[in-house]
Image: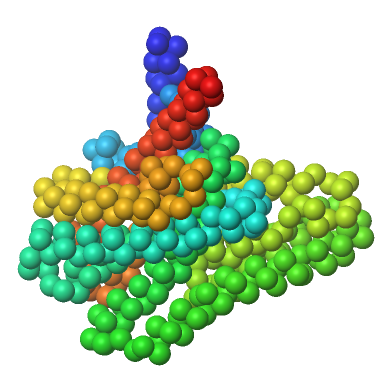
Amino acid sequence: MKTMIKRILLSSSLILAAATMPVSLYASGSEAGLQEATSVSEILLALILILFAAKIGGELFEKMKQPAVLGELIFGILIGNIALLSGDVFSFGNLFSNEIISTLAELGVMILLFQVGLESNIKDMMKVGISSVLVAVIGVAVPMVLGYFVSSWILPGAGFNTWLFIGATLTATSVGITARVLKDLGKLSIPEAKIILGAAVVDDVLGLIILSIVSGIIVSGSISVGSIAYTSFISLAFLAGSIIIGLWTAPKIGAWVSKMHVEGMKIVTAFLFMFIMSYLAIEAGLAAIVGAFAAGLVLDDVIFVNKKEHPIDVLVKPLYCIFVPIFFVLMGIQVDLSVFFDMQVIMIALGITVASIIGKQACSVGVKCPEASKLIVGIGMISRGEVGLIFASVGKGLGVIDDSVFGAIVIMVILTTLVTPPLLKWSIQRKDLMFDNVKTDD
């Protein structure tokens, strides 16, 4: 116990030192009449703080037997709100709002889904395909209905468009959080992981369609059946086409690359493939992470004839360790803790959070795989993460979500993101324990 307390105090001291040192240097430079820091120096300063916080936070939470991603998120929140917590003694200003940092974070989540795809198997996912589709459909429909009625009850004067958009926001699932936890626990091969990952892909497509429909209703007051059909067709065609074409072209690419002797050709080829798939996903109107996941699914190390280099997943690992934490820390940095002090915001947040959790738990009804735990699947679909924030920002841009509702949605995203890792870990350990007890009884 004493050792744990010492580790917590040491970690807290380190992160405080990391947080205050760059600010003090930045401030002292201004007082000395030095020129304003260039964008390059600001980016480097932001990366130093983000990566340092990620590793200290991850280490601390792993020592407490919790997933490292939870430490990255919470330490990100602390960094993002250091001015509030310190009484404005320290402030980073716009240090983390740089577009390059945001791009690096997006690259991080793409690498995460690419790595998840590499460690997944299409044939295994096809075995739970029906469950994935059912989980996704139920997990989208129920939260949207619950979100609509809960928001209309808590905010009776907000209006139909606001209620509709809040409901739409609750449909989104962030596969990044769940995938990271499953990977950290070494559980990407279990049936529940395959169902969750498959459902997340379908969920993304359904979420895109719903966002398109709701936005169309708000902008024009009506919705075109043709635009819905077009969006649906493009989304489904991309998913099916990318996997079919990828499975056909990947072996040919691997054979060609294996004949080349340039160092690092395998990892460069893998990333080129990921970038192409992600680009095509964006052009199709989908999220880049869908393309990255599809690229990982079809790019198996077996296609490379030359085995002199390490497997792809091993080559990707160093980049994974650098860029993926940037995404999770930055997600925490973007959270404004001041919204927690508004009681109306808290009431809205609690209402839609309960609706979002219950709604995703209902999706476990769609699990038809006997070996899979409905509880694990339901918990794995809870997290809203960056997807929920994207929905909220669109709603704010359309003028149907004001600052208080936006703050409530942010709190909902925080809560669902923070509760998912420990609950997912607990549910998996619970299943493992029950399985061990059954073996012992036998």
Instruction: Give the residue at x 54% y 55%.
Output: 128
* Among the 4 quarters of the image, the one containing residue 389: bottom left
30 or 130, which is in the foreground? 130
Instruction: Give the residue at x 22% y 49%.
Output: 354
Q: Is residue 383 visible?
A: no
135 or 328, which is in the foreground? 135
Q: Residue 267: where, in percent of width, then height?
A: 75, 54
Left or right: 222 in relation to 284? left
Q: Is residue 432 visible?
A: yes
* Among the 4 quarters of the image, the one containing residue 57: top left
**Above/below status of 145 relative to 328:** below
- Give the farthest residue toward the front: 442
Q: Residue 131: where, in percent of width, then height?
A: 47, 57
- Give the farthest residue toward the left: 157
Q: Residue 274: where, in percent of width, then height?
A: 66, 62
Q: Residue 161: where, in percent of width, then height?
A: 20, 74
* Among the 4 quarters of the image, the one containing residue 174: bottom left
Q: How many marks?
A: 0
326 or 91, which is in the foreground? 326
Instruction: Give the residue at x 85% y 52%.
Output: 263
Instruction: Give the residue at x 71% y 59%.
Output: 299
Which quarter of the figure is the N terminus placed in? top left
The colour mode here is rainbow
